[in-house]
Amino acid sequence: MKLLCLDCDSTLSEIEGVDELAAVRGNEVKQQIVDLTNQAMSGEIAIEEIFGKRLNLIKPTKQLCEEVGQLYIDKASEGVKESLDNLRAKGWMPIIISGGFIDPIKPFAKFLEIDEIYAVPLHFDKEGEYESFTASPTTRNGGKPEILQELIEKYNPEVTVMVGDGVSDLECQGVASLFIGYGEYEAREKVKASAEKFAYNFSEIEKILEVYS
Ligand SMILES: [Mg+2]
């Protein structure tokens, strides 16, 4: 079996879930969130520094998370569903490793027929108002390679590939057999310069992975 670990935001889908959640709080809050996310994904500041800060600004409700779940589906990367089907037929098992939130990602994972998701759980009160989040590995730098390592021990795969647009994904290079940077939406300088491979769409990823068939 071959593991295909995938970032979610700006990779499997065009959107950054957290930015979309922020949008309902008005332009000023959204801009603050977009800036913080960009700084973290380009490696200027640590993820753990912005994580709680962003959530306290947004306070996402359960209902809002469901709406963003639909948006992930509507904005899915072109041909991604078909590419994942092709890759599954060749023995790849897709898994999502995301610094985003489990609630909105779940319906998207279901749409893509991905069973295993590593992301951040949010907690809501009885009215569906935001209460807190669980400080999971992907709320800090070094969290994605940590999860990857656990998956390698769990499945003992022939090959492990990580795909993503951010510096937090790039951190998996060296732990994964191969890291593929993803630049369809954000070709981040640091990621593009260091990534072993770089792709702009999912057919390119399929081609890159042909070496393992
Ligand atoms: Mg991303």
Image (cartoon, grey):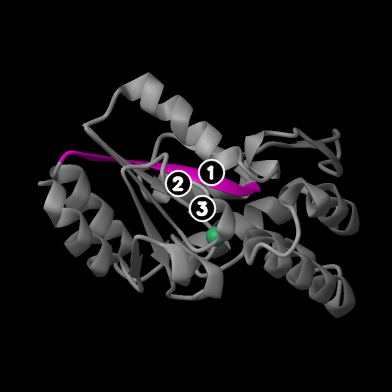
Kind of residue at badge 1: Lys
Residue 178 percent across, percent down from the top left: 32, 49
Residue 9 percent across, percent down from the top left: 55, 60
The tag earlier along the polypeptide, 1 or 3, is 1
- Rendering quadrant holding ligand 1: bottom right
Q: Is residue 213 left or right of residue 117?
A: left
- The disc placed on residue 184 is none
Quadrant the N terminus occupies:
top left
Mark 1 crowdedness (10 Å alpha carbons): few <14, some 14-19, many ≥20: some
> Circle 2 is placed at which residue position?
109
Mark 3 crowdedness (10 Å alpha carbons): few <14, some 14-19, many ≥20: many
Give yes or no for residue 95 being in the magenta stretch. Answer: yes
Q: What main secondary structure does the magenta stretch of the protein show?
A: strand
| Ligand 1 has an atom within 8 Å of the beta carbon of the residue at disc 3 | yes
Task: Identify which residue is drawn at 30% across, 65% down.
Answer: 202
In the displayed image of the protein, which residue is found farthest to the left? 213
Image position of 179 with respect to 32: above or below: above
| Separation (CA) of disc 3 from disc 2 | 18 Å
The tag earlier along the polypeptide, 3 or 2, is 2
